[in-house]
Image (cartoon, helix red, strand yellow):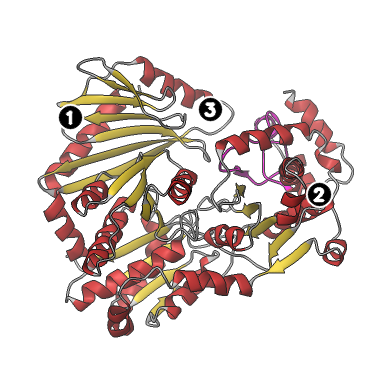
């Protein structure tokens, strides 16, 4: 694509948004090439990118283009689907509300019913609302945990899960047909309200959602006795969790909690947390100060769209330390299955679902309770699809789903990761260990002592700019061409290539199908139970390298992990 010609096209549009026009005039040649060289990708997670002018960035014109494509897809489904409509929510980021309102205006022009939240709401509540209102689709304006300069556009299907790859591919075709971004028609709000094509929602959906969240907790007797004694610090990281997270805790009786006050403001600058991501320890700095002052039992943080949850607990040194996403999953699962077994509520066909880049520890815990583990591709939409399969085929009872990247789901009234559900169960778990005169740290050590010491780590490498994608492709191609039989002293047993849907046994050369959707992932399963996975991110210009080990104790597991990381680097040079 001729980026200079596209740039001139934007520059010459007289009615261009003034803010975008100003940015346009200050662009370097490299910025022009990156912003106008190719359009934003639209995948199963929708689209996400930097805010700014151009076909390759997030702005009102690319948002309207995506919505016009979605509208044309909906129109092809028939008038009944038009009436089912689309639910739209948004987070606290720059332009999120504007993008949501523009999306509503474009859909409304096509006589498609829209349910628009009156203010910021979490991604999981959008997923719930789609199901509750029997809508055909949903749009969430968010860049999740990315820095302030990003925004995004997620599309959900009628089941409340992110749009399937098949539907996303069709919508992409419609989007690409919209070549004139500057003259996409939209309807006026008063016209849509008069025609009953735009319905504002909010508190009504909150109450229905919170009623379902109350079903997540397991032991009400425990909560009644110990919730008032359990101290919790919560930060919504300037995002949507502030609307509903504290209500969920209060509803369950956890009134003894402390909000990080200045982070409970819908501030798109994310002033104290330039990376508003609970995966990073620095996001807990303010919560740690409050925690130390009040001697809190647990610190929790949700990202700006409240689908991910991070947790910090006290270790033996008396300081708060961050748990990994895999450790949080193991703690939740162990508590959940133990409680269900004691209450005789463990179904014979119980199942958990995890992504292929997550820890093997939850599998081991689940197996000890007679619960089956299903592994799916990375992306919570695949967990959502498996839950739907259980519902349709009656071939499993969903108990828990998770991704290592701090995403958890306990009850399927939502079909995406849900930090609000996770907050309430983690509060209960903190109360449980407090009732035993223990801490969550003690509980984690009990799990390790019983099942082995598991250590996981994710390492990311960024590849920005137009050449970034080529570099990422080059690395994946090199790994596929290289026959790796061992990482140091640890032999490789299987290599799994999810792009080829193939598993190969190293010693025999025997090949078998993975029976998984196609995706650009390589996974190495080692003879000792360790594993390595390599996956280019679907939403960010980076490759993620995942490592998992286990050992008789923490020291051996850590040592093994360091070896694997060092050995993989040799193949990346």
Q: Which residue is mark 3?
A: 469
- Number of the front mark, 3 or 1: 1
Q: Which residue is mark 2?
A: 17
Q: Does residue 40 show up magenta in the picture?
A: yes
Per the image, label 2 sits on a secondary structure element best described as: loop
| Residue 415 coordinates in the image, percent (x, y) | 50, 54
Q: Is residue 282 left or right of residue 18?
A: left
Secondary structure predominantly adopted by residues drawn in magenta? loop
* Magenta part of the chain: 30-59
- Spatial CA distance of label 2 from label 1 is 58 Å
Q: Earlier in the sequence, mark 2 or mark 1?
A: 2
Q: Earlier in the sequence, mark 3 or mark 1?
A: 3
Q: Is residue 440 left or right of residue 18?
A: left
- Number of the front mark, 2 or 3: 3
On the question of residue 322 being in view, the answer is no
Q: Which residue is mark 1?
A: 527
Circle 2 residues within 10 Å: few <14, some 14–19, many ≥20: few
- Spatial CA distance of label 3 from label 1 is 33 Å
- Spatial CA distance of label 2 from label 3 is 30 Å
Residue reaching furthest front?
A: 394
**Relative to 354, residue 92 above or below:** below
């Amino acid at each position: 694509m001729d980026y200079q010609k596209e740039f001139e096209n934007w520059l010459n549009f007289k009615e261009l948004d003034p803010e975008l026009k100003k940015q346009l005039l200050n662009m370097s040649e490299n910025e022009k090439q990156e912003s106008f060289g190719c359009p934003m990708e639209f995948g199963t997670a929708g689209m996400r990118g930097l805010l700014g002018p151009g076909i390759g960035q997030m702005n009102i014109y690319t948002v309207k283009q995506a919505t016009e494509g979605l509208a044309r897809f909906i129109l092809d489904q028939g008038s009944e689907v038009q009436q089912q409509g689309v639910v739209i929510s948004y987070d606290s980021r720059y332009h999120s509300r504007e993008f949501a309102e523009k999306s509503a205006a474009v859909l409304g022009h096509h006589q498609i019913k829209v349910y628009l939240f009156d203010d910021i709401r979490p991604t999981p509540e959008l997923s719930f609302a789609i199901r509750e209102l029997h809508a055909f689709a949903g749009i969430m304006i968010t860049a999740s945990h990315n820095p302030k300069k990003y925004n995004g556009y997620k599309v959900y299907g009628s089941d409340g899960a992110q749009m399937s790859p098949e539907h996303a591919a069709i919508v992409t075709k419609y989007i690409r047909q919209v070549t004139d971004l500057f003259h996409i028609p939209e309807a006026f709000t008063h016209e849509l309200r008069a025609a009953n094509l735009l319905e504002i929602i909010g508190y009504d959906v909150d109450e229905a959602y919170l009623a379902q969240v109350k079903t997540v907790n397991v032991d009400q007797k425990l909560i009644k006795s110990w919730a008032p004694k359990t101290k919790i610090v919560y930060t919504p990281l300037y995002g949507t969790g502030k609307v509903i997270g504290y209500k969920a805790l209060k509803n369950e009786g956890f009134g003894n909690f402390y909000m990080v006050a200045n982070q409970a403001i819908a501030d798109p600058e994310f002033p104290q947390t330039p990376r508003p991501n609970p995966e990073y320890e620095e996001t807990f700095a303010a919560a740690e100060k409050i925690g130390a002052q009040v001697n809190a039992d647990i610190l929790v943080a949700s990202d700006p769209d409240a689908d991910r949850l991070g947790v910090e607990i006290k270790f033996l040194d008396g300081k708060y330390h961050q748990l990994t996403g895999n450790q949080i999953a193991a703690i939740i699962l162990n508590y959940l299955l133990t409680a269900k077994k004691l209450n005789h509520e463990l179904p014979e066909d119980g199942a958990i679902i995890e992504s292929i880049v997550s820890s093997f520890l939850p599998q081991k815990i689940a197996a000890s309770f007679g619960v089956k583990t299903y592994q799916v591709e990375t992306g919570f939409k695949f967990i959502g699809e498996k839950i739907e399969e259980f519902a349709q085929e009656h071939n499993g009872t969903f108990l828990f789903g998770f991704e290592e990247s701090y995403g958890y789901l306990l009850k399927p009234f939502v079909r995406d990761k849900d930090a609000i559900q996770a907050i309430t169960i983690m509060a209960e778990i903190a109360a449980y260990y407090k009732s035993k005169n223990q801490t969550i740290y003690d509980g984690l050590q009990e799990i390790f002592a019983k099942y082995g010491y598991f250590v996981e780590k994710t390492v990311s490498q960024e590849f920005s700019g137009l050449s970034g994608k080529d570099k990422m492709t080059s690395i994946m191609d090199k790994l596929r061409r290289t026959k790796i039989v061992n990482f140091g002293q640890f032999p490789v047993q299987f290599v799994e290539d999810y792009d080829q849907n193939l598993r190969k046994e190293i010693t025999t050369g025997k090949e078998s199908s993975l029976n998984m959707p196609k995706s650009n992932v390589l996974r190495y399963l080692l003879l000792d139970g360790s594993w390595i996975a390599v996956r280019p991110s679907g939403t960010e210009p980076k490759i993620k390298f995942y490592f998992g080990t286990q050992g008789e104790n923490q020291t051996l597991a850590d040592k093994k992990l360091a070896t694997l990381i060092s050995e993989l680097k040799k193949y990346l040079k």
